[in-house]
Image (spheres, rainbow, N blue to C red):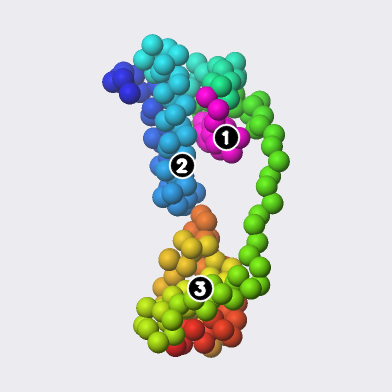
């Protein structure tokens, strides 16, 4: 990127403040904040290219310019999911600006996400699940560990990231429960079935 001007009113400063707000006040995960940062940096690169390297102020960006950015993404054949996510990042950024007082309006609010059919999720058959759960060997410490991992994911309906974040103290075997820290670091409890409990104990 070109060297930013010293003017603190340009877009770079509120972007940094917005990301800090997501981390500190909204308690978003590092992965979510990384996605917001990449989305806003991609938009900023577009603005810089359109203005010969001059970084604009937030109030200089119009709905018409954002429509141009939307058209550029479509012409570059970005997926509908990527376009929708980037537009959501822009809406969130300008909503923060309205709250902070440096944005009079939200120019991204008028933009519509591209329409598309949501594919149906692929579901494993019962036989596939049984083969997966029984794949790790029972006569090996790593196999026992892997069985406990798979049984816990399946029984409690966990994301892989949620399972990786578990501490031993989060597993309440006496009550067949596991405490989970999910997206946004929100906590919830899920039930452990008898097979998962047995696998963990082993």
Instruction: Assign a secondary structure to mark 3.
Output: helix
Q: Is residue 193 above or below residue 5?
A: below
- The residue located at (41%, 73%) in the rendering is 167
The alpha-carbon separation of the residues under discs 1 and 3 comes to 32 Å
Residue 41, picture quadrant = top left
Q: Is residue 200 above or below residue 149?
A: below
The alpha-carbon separation of the residues under discs 2 and 1 comes to 15 Å
- The residue located at (69%, 51%) in the rendering is 120
Residue holding disc 3: 150
Numbered-mark total: 3
- The residue located at (48%, 63%) in the rendering is 160
The answer to if 90 sits in the magenta stretch is yes
Q: Position of residue 188 (x, y in %)?
A: 57, 67
Our reading of the magenta stretch's main secondary structure is helix
Residue holding disc 2: 35
Instruction: Assign a secondary structure to mark 2.
Output: helix
Which mark is nearer the camera, 2 or 3? 3
Which residues make up the magenta segment? 76-97
Q: Is residue 55 visible?
A: yes
Crowding around mark 1 (Cα neighbors within 10 Å: few <14, some 14 to 19, many 20+) is few
| Sequence order check, earlier mark of 2 and 1 | 2
Q: Position of residue 1 (x, y in %)?
A: 33, 23
Crowding around mark 3 (Cα neighbors within 10 Å: few <14, some 14 to 19, many 20+) is many
**Left/right of residue 6 with respect to residue 150 in the rendered view:** left
| Sequence order check, earlier mark of 2 and 3 | 2
Q: Is residue 56 visible?
A: no
Instruction: Assign a secondary structure to mark 1.
Output: loop
Which mark is nearer the camera, 2 or 1? 1
| Sequence order check, earlier mark of 1 and 3 | 1
Residue 79 is marked as: 1
């Amino acid at each position: 990127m070109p060297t930013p001007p010293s003017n603190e009113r340009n877009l770079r400063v509120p972007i940094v403040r917005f990301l800090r707000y997501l981390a500190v006040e909204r308690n978003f995960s590092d992965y979510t904040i990384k996605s917001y940062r990449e989305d806003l940096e991609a938009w900023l690169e577009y603005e810089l290219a359109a203005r010969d390297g001059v970084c604009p102020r937030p109030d200089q960006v119009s709905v018409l310019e954002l429509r141009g950015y939307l058209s550029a993404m479509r012409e570059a054949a970005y997926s509908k999911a990527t376009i929708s996510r980037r537009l959501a990042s822009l809406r969130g950024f300008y909503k923060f600006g309205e709250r902070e007082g440096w944005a009079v309006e939200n120019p991204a609010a008028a933009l519509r996400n591209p329409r598309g059919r949501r594919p149906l999720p692929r579901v494993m058959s019962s036989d596939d699940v049984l083969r997966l759960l029984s794949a790790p060997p029972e006569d090996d410490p790593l196999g026992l560990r892997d069985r406990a991992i798979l049984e816990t994911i399946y029984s409690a309906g966990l994301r892989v990231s949620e399972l990786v974040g578990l501490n031993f103290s989060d597993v309440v075997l006496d009550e067949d429960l596991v405490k989970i820290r999910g997206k946004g670091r929100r906590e919830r409890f899920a039930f452990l079935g008898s097979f998962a409990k047995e696998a963990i104990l082993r």
